[in-house]
Amino acid sequence: MAGQATTVQTDLMAALSASGDVVYEWDVARDTLKWTGPAGEFFGLESLAPVDTGDLFHGRINSEDLKERLKRLSRHFATGARFDCEYRLRGGDSEFIWVHERGQADFLPDGRPLVMRGVMRAITSRKRAEQRLEYLANYDELTGHFNRFRLRQAIDFALTACRRFGRTGAFLTVDIDNIAMINDAFGYEIGDAVLSGLAERLDQLTGSSDIIGRVEGDCFGLLLDHCNEAMAEEMAERIIVGVRESAIQTVMGEVAITVSVGGIVFPTSAQTSFDVMSRAEMALRQAKKEGRNHHVAYQLTEMQRHNLRQDMGIAKQVQEALLDNRLVLAYQPIIDTHTLEPKYYECLLRMRRPDGLILPAGAFVPVVEQLGLMRQIDRCTLDLAVEELHRDLNVRLTLNISGMTASDQAWLRKLVGLLRGQPEIATRLMIEITETVVLQDLDESARFVAAVRDLGCGVALDDFGAGYTSFRNLQALAVDMVKIDGAFIKDLANRPDNQLFIRTLLGLAKGFGLDTVAECVETEAEAAILRKEEVTFMQGYLYGRPELDRNAIALPTPRLLQQPTRHAIANRALSSR
């Protein structure tokens, strides 16, 4: 028996050493702590004397976290509820490390705690990754200003304040006129330096109460509170002149730039943040058409009225196509990274005109979204996808739905009506919702995901990385798959920053055991990097363009890697269930 105990102890020590975890036993009455495992290395201490009592241990916990740890400990002693806590602990070099602690106490008959035993794990790396993603959920990594999602929230808040107090505000979009030329001449690193320089210049030219955000690419948004039309025009001119007359300093020397500005005053010309941003961008496009280095305030010009009439015509065509069953699906394969065989096909909407010409979604979906017809479209695509699943009992499909549909109870009821009691159909359908939509209302999105998964369907988080979903958000959503935003895949071989970001996203997804899809894969160089990083699936022109007839897609020759990775084997096992 002694030999068995020694073997068990040896195995325990080996396991703790391999994991880096430490186990403790706390004699509560005597306030003594005994440690098992690599405790010295864990705490960064040569001697465990500084952590051999509860009081000494508590003295090393970050003061901001100590109260929460003590509260949970008291609750455990009072109710026996599971003790589980994360907090910062000062190590031997006085730097704080993050730890995750779980424990369970033994109690005397009178209810007093006798001995508590638990385990601690260092989670500093995970916390840093979480904090980074939390930061990126609100801020642009390059400039430190708000990102598009956070900027839209600020506009919504400003709109509410303007309506409540009867005042006006303004929103300006500022775009570099010659960024493509700069990137071609000097490279993307200098282009990024110019973007950072413009962000600093906007800080200098604007007031302390003004809010700056990066809308996308080389386009910035500027939210001005207590601002009328004259003040907005004055600010726009100040920015144009200030940027034009002072070059941006880079490691390649000075780079001269000019900017164009589009502006809108609200709430007189826009009632929602979507309207504010889209109409300011419309004014910006007009400024560029008029020669750049110029400011245009939003107003409905004759050309814009003409475009609006065209949009109404497109909407009429879409409604007629709905009635005539001329909306069809094209299919693009999603390829298993290791076998190069199609695992899913993504359903992509197309419209067949009366003359037989096939129009891609980009020709009509943006108009449909603006005019509020997207729910009808999504119901139609759901019907088409389910029909295809009935027609081919071996195919697996993914179906992307709009943000409005993700909160549409009528669409969800339709899904339930089509798939209830048909697991052989439901399990072959994956519903895709975009990350940026999820972040707008996480609780509602989580309820939607739960309802879809209860039917047996899978759920994929599309454009993963675009809105910087955090650890907590993924935990709340419980999706089955994440699709990495194609913007991070394009030119991946030449963008080490994107490679690092993708590695972070994949690490987060793998931590939850999620399948991953890399979108917009167009070159073998991109595919090689993604295989190395162990992406589960790939999708893009390299492996097949969307086709109305799936059999017409030129698929790559299936193959098996000689030595598939352990992660790949696990993923294939999970995906086959």
Image (cartoon, rainbow, N blue to C red):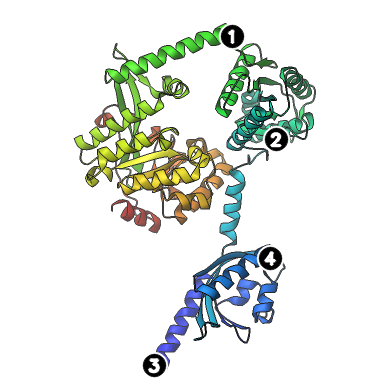
Going from the N terminus, do you reach mark 2 or mark 3 first? 3
Q: Where 576 sits versus 202, above or below?
A: below
Q: Give the quadrant of the N terminus.
A: bottom left
Q: State the residue in front, 416 or 503.
A: 416
Q: Mark 4 vs mark 3: give the one in front.
A: 4
The residue under label 2 is: 196
Q: On the picture, is 424 further left or further right than 524?
A: left
Going from the N terminus, do you reach mark 1 or mark 4 first? 4
Q: CA distance from mark 1 to mark 3?
A: 91 Å
Q: CA distance from mark 2 to mark 4?
A: 35 Å
Q: CA distance from mark 2 to mark 3?
A: 68 Å
Q: State the residue in front, 153 or 191.
A: 153
Mark 3 residue element: loop
Going from the N terminus, do you reach mark 2 or mark 4 first? 4
Residue, x 51% and y 35% (percent of image)? 487
Q: Mark 2 vs mark 4: give the one in front.
A: 4
Going from the N terminus, do you reach mark 2 or mark 1 first? 2
Q: Mark 1 vs mark 3: give the one in front.
A: 1
The label shown at residue 1 is 3
Mark 1 residue element: loop
Residue, x 46% and y 43% (percent of image)? 444
Q: CA distance from mark 2 to mark 1?
A: 34 Å
The residue under label 1 is: 301
Q: Quadrant of residue 159?
A: top right
Q: Quadrant of residue 276?
A: top right
Report the amino acid beneath label 3: Met
Crowding around mark 3 (Cα neighbors within 10 Å: few <14, some 14 to 19, many 20+) is few
Report the amino acid beneath label 1: Thr
The residue under label 4 is: 62
Q: Are marks 1 and 3 in contact (CB under 8 Å)?
A: no
Residue, x 45% and y 43% (percent of image)? 445
